[in-house]
Image: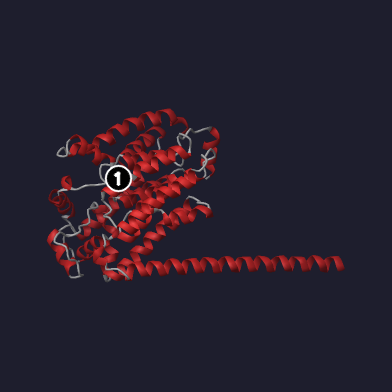
């Protein structure tokens, strides 16, 4: 009887410890959430929405709700002026019409409320990435301190949705191919950024006969396009008119492709696509060598780094989509010594430039970062030599 009482007391003590641990864990999460929400509130309310790229999404959403042209320079400028925008040239949403579904909800409220929701959504994309790809607790802080992630949140850019789309694709491409394909709609809000990725994805779908991924992507694009056409029947005409008038050829983007163009002939805009063409050739060879064991959670990590590296157009904030690749390298079995310290140093330098110098996201100051992430990845993974062990671990993740 006494033994039974002792066991009962021990069980009660263990349950008490578990309850205390659970309560402390909940309190820590609540405290962290409160800190994050406070920071988001400060970012949203403490700065003028008209001073951020976010204002272009709010303006497009407001115009589209009134069945007006969301790409009209004159209408966008007039609307932004009412919110304290002081520049002569408006900030226009340049994303394709199928991306307008992201902007429409913002148009229902004031710019301040919309900015708060937009910022929460951006932070939510990072949190979902952490959950979907099971990022270890010790690496989660880096995701929020990743310089491109902070750049995207502070500027109100749509780049975090690229991260969400890629994370959903990686999570579901094997188990739910249609959903994985539909999630590519979020990456298609900036289709120019993923030229190499699109080509290799098409090759893989055809080779493995995974046509549900393509069907899911096509259906999502059709749904997004139908939504925008419902609100503006001439939306594609307006979009192409905006592109013709935007003079993209005269703008600078911090990419290797832009540097290549400037070194060869600054007037030849077609040179921007030469690095992507060469990378596609490399991609064919890379896929051919690994086609029997191709795994997007493993081989797709290097592919995404190369894709962003050679992109013809891109901003510093767009590099947030590289977080899955970096997170993969964190857990690589053959990770090189001091690799994490080197990454912290690279990211620290980028943060100093972002937070102290405050350059534009399309500044020369960020020309080096895509190459830096790629070189670090190759160094950390010792040339990214894949073995059967690595493939098995990637499948488990």
Direction from residue 8 to residue 383 in the image, left or right? left
Rate crowding at label 1 as few (under 14), some (14 to 19) or many (20 or more) other CA atoms within 10 Å. Answer: some
Q: Quadrant of residue 149?
A: bottom left
Q: Secondary structure at mark 1?
A: loop
Q: Tally the numbered discs.
A: 1
Direction from residue 361 to residue 335 in the image, left or right? right
Residue 302 place in picture, x, y as percent: 41, 39
**Residue at the spot 31% in from the left edge and 46% down from the top edge:** 218
Q: Nearer the viewer, residue 236 or 313?
A: 313
- Please tell me whether residue 334 is drawn above or below residue 48 in the rendered image: above
Residue 168 appears in view: no
Q: Nearer the viewer, residue 50 or 208?
A: 50
Q: Nearer the viewer, residue 354 or 217?
A: 354
- Please tell me whether residue 324 is drawn above or below residue 279 in the rendered image: below
Residue 254 appears in view: yes
Residue 311 place in picture, x, y as percent: 29, 42
**Residue at the spot 42% in from the left edge and 49% down from the top edge:** 167
Residue 27 place in picture, x, y as percent: 55, 69
Direction from residue 27 to residue 34 in the image, left or right? left
- Please tell me whether residue 50 is drawn above or below residue 179 in the rendered image: below
- Residue bearing the label numbered 1: 367
Residue 91 place in picture, x, y as percent: 20, 59
Instruction: Give the image's coloring scheme.
Output: secondary structure
Direction from residue 95 to residue 69 in the image, left or right? left
Which quarter of the rendering shows the N terminus?
bottom right
**Residue at the spot 16% in from the left edge and 46% down from the top edge:** 250
Residue positioned most to the right: 1
């Amino acid at each position: 009887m006494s033994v039974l009482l002792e066991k009962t007391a021990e069980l009660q003590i263990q349950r008490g410890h578990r309850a205390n641990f659970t309560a402390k864990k909940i309190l820590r999460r609540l405290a962290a959430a409160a800190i994050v929400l406070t920071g988001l509130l400060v970012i949203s309310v403490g700065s003028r929405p008209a001073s951020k790229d976010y204002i272009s999404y709010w303006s497009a959403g407001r115009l589209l709700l009134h069945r007006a042209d969301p790409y009209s320079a004159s209408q966008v400028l007039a609307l932004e002026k009412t919110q304290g925008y002081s520049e002569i040239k408006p900030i226009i949403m340049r994303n394709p019409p199928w991306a307008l579904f992201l902007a429409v909800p913002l148009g229902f409220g004031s710019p301040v409320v919309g900015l708060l929701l937009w910022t929460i959504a951006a932070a939510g994309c990072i949190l979902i990435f952490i959950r979907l790809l099971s990022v270890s607790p010790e690496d989660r802080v880096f995701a929020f301190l990743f310089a491109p992630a902070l750049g995207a949140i502070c500027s109100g850019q749509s780049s975090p949705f690229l991260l969400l789309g890629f994370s959903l694709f990686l999570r579901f491409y094997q188990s739910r191919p249609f959903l994985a394909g539909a999630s590519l709609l979020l990456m298609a809000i900036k289709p120019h950024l993923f030229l190499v990725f699109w080509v290799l994805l098409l090759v893989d779908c055809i080779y493995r006969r995974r046509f549900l991924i393509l069907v899911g992507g096509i259906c999502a694009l059709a749904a997004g396009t139908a939504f925008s056409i419902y609100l503006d029947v001439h939306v594609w005409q307006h979009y192409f008119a905006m592109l013709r008038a935007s003079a993209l050829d005269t703008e600078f983007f911090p990419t290797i492709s832009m540097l290549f163009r400037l070194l060869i002939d600054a007037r030849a805009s077609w040179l921007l696509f030469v690095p992507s063409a060469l990378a596609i050739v490399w991609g064919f060879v890379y896929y051919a060598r690994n086609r029997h064991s191709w795994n997007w959670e493993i081989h797709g990590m290097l592919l995404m780094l190369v894709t962003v590296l050679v992109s013809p157009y891109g901003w510093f904030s767009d590099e947030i989509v590289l977080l899955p690749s970096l997170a993969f390298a964190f857990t690589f079995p053959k990770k090189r010594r001091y690799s994490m310290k080197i990454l912290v140093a690279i990211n620290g330098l980028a943060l100093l430039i972002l937070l102290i110098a405050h350059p534009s996201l399309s500044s020369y100051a960020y020309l080096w970062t895509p190459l830096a992430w790629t070189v670090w990845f190759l160094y950390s993974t010792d040339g990214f030599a894949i073995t059967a062990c690595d493939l098995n671990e990637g499948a488990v993740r």
